[in-house]
Image (cartoon, helix red, strand yellow):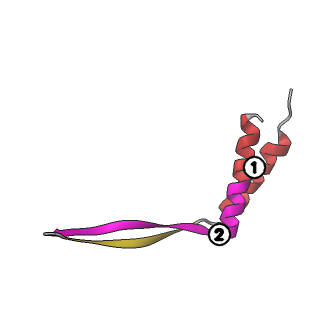
Amino acid sequence: MDAIKLVAILLIVAGALALGYGGFSYTKETHQADIGPIHMSVDEKQRVNVPVWAGVGAIVIGGFLLVGTKKK
């Protein structure tokens, strides 16, 4: 499998995941305090939304790379 086909498949999978999940979330540690033996921290959940057009665009570009490239 050559590099272009691998990139095309990864784009299609990433686009499908973007459409299916609509984004992803992660946890960010924002505040920390050490008072003697006591350790306190505050974690914030952040959400990143992936636009629908980005998912569709990744699928279309991946499909074009997969179908549009010819072996010589």
- For disc 2, the neighbor class at 10 Å (few under 14, some 14 to 19, many from 20) is few
Q: In the rendering, at what x and y percent does residue 8 appear?
A: 74, 46
Residue designated by label 1? 62
Q: In the rendering, at what x and y percent does residue 53 appear?
A: 68, 63
Q: In the image, is 37 to the left or to the right of 51?
A: left
Provide the secondary structure element on which disc 1 rests.
helix
The residue at the point 68 percent across, 62 percent down is 17
Provide the secondary structure element on which disc 2 rests.
helix
Q: Please name the amino acid that badge 2 sits on.
A: Tyr
Residue 33 in magenta stretch: yes
Magenta stretch: give its range. 13-35
Which image quarter: residue 15? bottom right
Above or below 13: residue 31:
below
Q: Earlier in the sequence, mark 2 or mark 1?
A: 2
The residue at the point 78 percent across, 43 percent down is 65
Residue 19 in magenta stretch: yes
| Residue that sits furthest to the top in the current view | 72
Relative to the observer, which residue lies in front, 31 or 37? 37
Q: In the image, is 59 to the left or to the right of 51?
A: right
Count of numbered marks: 2
Q: Which mark is residue 21?
A: 2
| Disc 2 from disc 1: Cα separation | 19 Å
Q: Please name the amino acid that badge 1 sits on.
A: Gly
- For disc 1, the neighbor class at 10 Å (few under 14, some 14 to 19, many from 20) is many
Q: Quadrant of the N terminus?
A: top right
Q: In the rendering, at what x and y percent does residue 70 appear?
A: 86, 34
Which image quarter: residue 56? bottom right
Relative to the observer, which residue lies in front, 4 or 37? 37
